[in-house]
Amino acid sequence: MDSLIAAAARFLAAGDAVEALKRVALRDDPPALALRGIAMAQLGELPRARELLRRAARGFGVREELARARCVVAEAEVALALRDFGGSPRALTAAAATLDAHADRGNALHARLIAVRRLLLLGRLDEAAAALNGLGARQASPSLQAVAELAAAEIALRSLRTVAARAALARADEAAERARVPALRAEVAEVRAALERPAARRVDAGREQPLHLDEVEALHASGALVIDACRRGLRAGTAWLPLARRPVLFALARALGEAWPADVHRNELIAHAFRTRRPNETHRARLRVEIGRLRALAALWVRVEATERGYAFVPADTRGPAHSASGEHVVVIAPPIDGDQASLVALLADGAPWSTSALALALGASQRTVQRALAELEAAGRARSIGKARARRWLAPPLAGFTTILLLPAALPLG
């Protein structure tokens, strides 16, 4: 390795892409192309970075498998930044194995951390946590320790374990300080700020109260029946009943929860569940059927009883008002953003450009459904697109007023 390549590599490791480019900008040999690609990625020129890394990998040839593996890892990180999940993760796994075989432990760990971050973006929290726990990142360099602790903090945040998240952030902050990489320190500060911003709204009979993540966690641990409009389900302690695929039942549960302990008129329930303002006997018959289904599903926590006007929630252990350990029995939490596209807005809020296919994969929805939602958001001025055809990407302005953690896919464990 010549002195210019070595100097550029040192500057890149410290996060100084401009100084690195000064050493290799006019060179076209494979090592210089690889370093130029990494530098361009650090400067945000991701498509150009991907092109340079691919040229470098071709230039190294089959005999220089260590250098090729490093290019594969760098290109995988660029794909992650581009929110391109179309490629197979097997190439990254193979590259990590090659790096291990050549005793390049740092880059092998970096490859596996990229795989963990990919799982996080796709909402596969259990897989991400299992993969992270097996890495042994505590013995790595400070910069890799910081990345690992940031991943641990995000897993804890999206699992609503704020104490664990704060501990991981403290370790990430300490590692980032030792690494002296400004971008890492900024990322730690941004995640820490998310803990201090409202994450949801509590809705009670027309009144709204902003909630932070630790307050949402406290509600879940209180023993109250939490009607969670962020994840569309019912939670009481560790029990979780998902209703995302049963929108009528969830609409009824939310309307009854917001009115609790009062009842809700039948016509109002029909309007919430069936979206009609002119109820007829068919709607009333269907309402009775859906109420029966909700009554059976929620029987362990609450009863649904008929009143003269309509229906009401009544605690399961008594016909009068009852309270959990927190002094409440039924609580409704709603997203910080109204609308059916809340999860989509939450993914776009990270400021990175997303393709339609990547959004569909992260949300578990069809591409056509995501395209329709994006068109509505664009019409409302809440999303914008760049590029054309297959190169089209979607972004949203940063939502600095609140955190979108609860709106992200798989934000709560379903156990």
Image: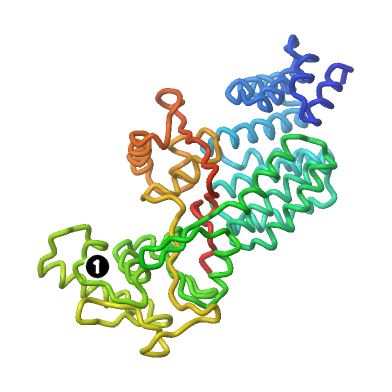
Instruction: State how many labels appear.
Output: 1
Query: In the displayed image of the protein, which residue is found farthest to the left?
Result: 281
* Nearest to the observer: residue 186 or residue 64: 186
Please give the residue where the numbered disc 1 appears in the rendered image: 269
Q: Position of residue 48 (x, y in %)?
A: 61, 20
Question: Left of 236 or right of it: where is 266?
Answer: left
Query: Quadrant of residue 305 in the image?
Result: bottom left
Question: Which amino acid type corresponds to the residue marked 1 in the rendered image?
Answer: Leu
Q: Position of residue 235 (x, y in %)?
A: 47, 71
Q: Position of residue 361 (x, y in %)?
A: 47, 45
- Kindly state the secondary structure of the residue where label 1 is placed: helix
Query: In the displayed image of the protein, which residue is found farthest to the right?
Result: 3
| Residue occupying the point 71% across, 41% down | 111
Please, is residue 398 above or below residue 46 in the view? below
Question: Left of 101 or right of it: where is 194?
Answer: left
Query: Quadrant of residue 70 in the image?
Result: top right
What's the image's color scheme?
A: rainbow
Query: In the displayed image of the protein, which residue is found farthest to the bottom?
Result: 318
| Residue occupying the point 80% across, 15% down | 23
* The N terminus - image quarter: top right
| Residue occupying the point 23% across, 82% down | 307
Question: Left of 310 or right of it: where is 247?
Answer: right
| Residue occupying the point 72% across, 23% down | 34
Query: In the displayed image of the protein, which residue is found farthest to the top?
Result: 26
* Nearest to the observer: residue 405 or residue 192: 192
Query: Quadrant of residue 96 in the image?
Result: top right
Question: Left of 344 or right of it: where is 251?
Answer: left
Q: Position of residue 376 (x, y in %)?
A: 33, 38
